[in-house]
Amino acid sequence: MEPLNKLEAHFKRLSHFQHLAAICGWDQATMMPDGGNQARADAMAELALYCHQQSTQPELSDWLAELDDKLEQLTPTQKASVAEMKREWQQASVLPDTLVKAKSLAGAKCEHAWRQQRQDNDWAGFAKNLKEVVALAREEAHIRADQKGCAPYDALLDLYEPGMTADRVDEVFGALKAWLPETIQAVVDKQAQQPPLMPKGPFTQAQQKALGEQVMQQLGFNFAQGRLDVSTHPFCGGVPTDVRITTRYDEQDFTSALMGVIHETGHARYEQGLPKDLAGLPVGQARSMGVHESQSLFFEMQLARSEAFATLICQRAKSAFNRQNDPAFHVENFHRVLTQVAPGYIRVDADEVTYPAHIMLRYDIERDLISGNMEVDHIPERWDNAMQQYLGLSTAGNYKNGCMQDIHWTDGSFGYFPTYTLGALYAAQLMQAMRQQMDVDGIIASGNVSPIFDWLSQHIWQRASTTSTDNILKDATGETLNPAHFREYIQGRYL
């Protein structure tokens, strides 16, 4: 069918430029010298503008219109493909070129400066750049909201979690707030009766990287189509055939980097497991950031912090650091280390019990920022109040470990944060369904964990964006999102 062939050819060609943009972004965060930032920012802004222009070509509208009368002739996958191409075209076409370029430049400037400003605890310097980013994000949100007929924040949330609304997030997070604070305290009190013996460093970066790569191999990461590097903020980037993951190392605590590697490997396996026959098309991409995060949290929390998998990691860690006789590396103690719950300042280092609190406070702030109910200057005080409410910690004056710790807002990624906790809820629900169908712990103990990945491939990875998140969850677990599974899981593991 000619219009469909033309659309597919166009989007596959566009995906090649998006591939280049992804690798340029990875290089900017990992390898690029500081002096190259302005030239790189200019180049990436031009590339972003070019991709935007290609996504809004007038003929796309014509081809999509031609297909409207021929949808009954298409297969279900082709119909889904057309829907995703139309969605991507609509999202791109609503924004003017000038705004796309301005956002790219402001984001690159803010992100690059943030790296040093965070180290220097320089809120004033960071706030100046962030105000420009927020102003552009608000402009984008209102443009998208007018086109979709929804609230501004919902329009941004839909970019990352299609179909999700702030009302639904409020409902889910409201349920969490009802039981999470008292559960955190109960777990802390229980664990205080038998605190773990913490492994003592130093653990060299070379040793940690070798251990991380061994565990990545155990988790099925394809090193022929990906690699592990270092960055200020851990991330997974690149494309399915060239996945780049990063971590950051602390020579006194190897578990932080290792769990970061496992988390990013979950993202990477999802990317590497997407259907090859749909590569380069919007329908062949990950369904949503919430689903993406469900895979990283499935790997890190559901899988790696289980007693069975902790046993596998412990044996590898003993060998990697030559700690065969170290009591901190006894399996029972090692599992207590991996499941220790302690309120802390840093989101990416948080345990799975306190982690949702970090997300809820960020969600509340960014929702009000976009709606205009608060300004950038109010962030530190709002952050401090929420940290005290949820975790009993104060960040007054501590911007580095408070409101400046994350990279997401630097490039205007508002609407992203809620997907982290949505992903945790999805992951708990998926694991419960998996346990009803197979002996998960027995499979892990055998050392061959491929049946777990086969299940994920069938129910999540191979489905890509061929259907909605609700349908993916319902087909895999028998129901759409049900936060009760996360509560049952947390209280079952920790209490």
Image: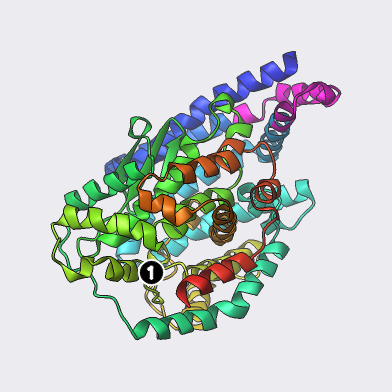
Residue at image point 63% right, 51% down: 161
Q: Picture coordinates of residue 453 (x, y %)?
A: 48, 43
In the image, is 146 to the left or to the right of 364? right
Magenta stretch: give its range.
53-80
Report the residue marked by disc 1. 339
Residue at image point 60% right, 49% down: 160
- Whether residue 489 is situated above or below residue 433 in the rendered picture: below
Look at the image and say whether residue 54 sits in the magenta stretch.
yes
Name the amino acid type tagged 1: Thr
State whether residue 310 appears in this view. yes
- Whether residue 423 is situated above or below residue 176 in the rendered picture: above
Q: What secondary structure do most residues of the magenta stretch adopt?
A: helix
Judging depth in this view, the residue of 379 and 167 nearest the camera is 167
Look at the image and say whether residue 232 sits in the magenta stretch.
no
Q: Picture coordinates of residue 25 (x, y %)?
A: 41, 40
Q: Quadrant of residue 173?
A: bottom right
- Whether residue 171 is situated above or below residue 448 in the rendered picture: below
